[in-house]
Image: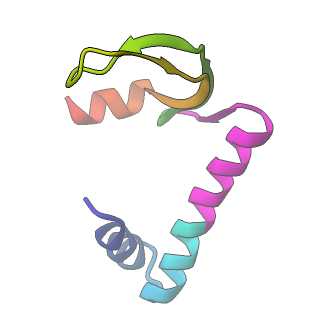
Amino acid sequence: MSKNELVMYVAEAANMSKAEAGRAVDAVMAGITEGLKKDGKVTLVGFGTFSSKKRAARDGINPLTKEPLHIPAKNVVSFKAGSKLKDSVN
């Protein structure tokens, strides 16, 4: 499902215009992003948990040239599905 399809789904399910639904979807994404920046974790009970984790710097190898290279440290986002989401998919 693309973002546009999600906006259309929200508009139909909540009986609102596509413009309002688009703003609502954007607000939810902005809230999740802000929560990850501020607290490093966003929990939606039954749906899942988004968390920000630090990935340490490491040395790697360029697979094309086989030369060693340094991969810098960075933050990555992970998602763990909640029980209700898992049950609804299965």
Residue at the image point whose x is 20% and y is 25% from the top:
64
Q: Which of 64 and 41 is in front in this view?
A: 64
**Number of residue marks:** 0
Residue 17: quarter of image: bottom left
Dominant secondary-structure state across the stretch colored magenta: helix
> Where is residue 23 shown, x and y percent of the image?
57, 77
> Where is residue 11 shown, x and y percent of the image?
41, 78
- Does residue 46 lie above or below 27 as drawn? above
- Give the residues drawn in magenta, as a range: 27-45
Left or right side of 85 for 49: right
Residue at the image point whose x is 78% and y is 33% from the top:
39
- Does residue 25 lie above or below 84 as drawn? below
- Does residue 74 lie above or below 28 as drawn? above
> Where is residue 75 shown, x and y percent of the image?
61, 29
Q: Nearer the viewer, residue 41 or 83?
A: 41
Left or right side of 8 for 50: right
Left or right side of 43 for 16: left
The way the protein has been coloured in the rendering is rainbow
Left or right side of 73 for 68: left
Residue 31: quarter of image: bottom right
Q: Quarter of the image containing the N terminus?
A: bottom left
Residue 89 among magenta residues = no
Q: Which of 43 and 31 is in front in this view?
A: 31
**Going by the picture, which residue comes out furthest to the right?**
38
Residue at the image point whose x is 29% and y is 70% from the top:
5
Q: Quarter of the image containing the C terminus?
A: top left
Residue at the image point whose x is 52% and y is 11% from the top:
58
